[in-house]
């Protein structure tokens, strides 16, 4: 995936996971499209890329971007409040 497209995908994954988590809490059932409310569940609904190790600079930058976005997301969105 092109680095410029990653932030939009990250936001989509977070939005889908949040929707699934809310659905699970409200209904007691797993969301039919997005799973159980975890990032892993929404990520696994897509074609997964080969996962290199942290010695790969592009992978490391991408991982760091996800962590920064997750920190920002958790500050600006209610998480189990």
Image (spheres, rainbow, N blue to C red):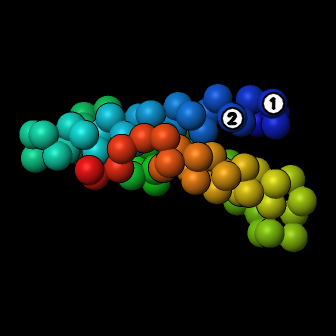
Q: Residue at x 50, y 48 (%)?
A: 75
Splitting the image into 4 quarters, where does residue 54 fall? bottom right
Total number of numbered discs in the rendering: 2
Splitting the image into 4 quarters, where does residue 35 fall? top left
Q: Residue 14 at x, y = what percent? A: 48, 40
Q: Residue 10 at x, y = what percent? A: 60, 39
Which residue is label 2 attached to? 7
Task: Pick the quarter of the image with the N terminus.
Answer: top right
- Is 20 positioned to the left or the right of 45 in the image? left
Q: Residue at x 82, y 54 (%)?
A: 61
Q: Residue at x 52, y 44 (%)?
A: 73
Which numbered tag is attached to residue 4? 1
| 67 is higher (above) or lower (below) than 69 | below
For label 2, the SS is helix
Graded by Cα atoms within 10 Å as few (under 14), some (14 to 19) or many (20 or more), the crowding at tag 1 reads few
Which residue is more in the foreground, 36 or 14? 14
């Amino acid at each position: 995936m092109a680095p410029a497209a990653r932030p939009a995908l990250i936001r989509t994954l977070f939005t889908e996971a949040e929707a699934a988590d809310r659905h699970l809490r409200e209904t007691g059932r797993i969301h039919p499209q997005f799973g159980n409310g975890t990032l892993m569940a929404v990520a696994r609904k897509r074609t997964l890329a080969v996962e290199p190790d942290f010695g790969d600079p592009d992978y490391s930058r991408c991982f760091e971007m996800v962590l920064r976005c997750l920190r920002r997301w958790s500050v600006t969105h209610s998480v189990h409040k």
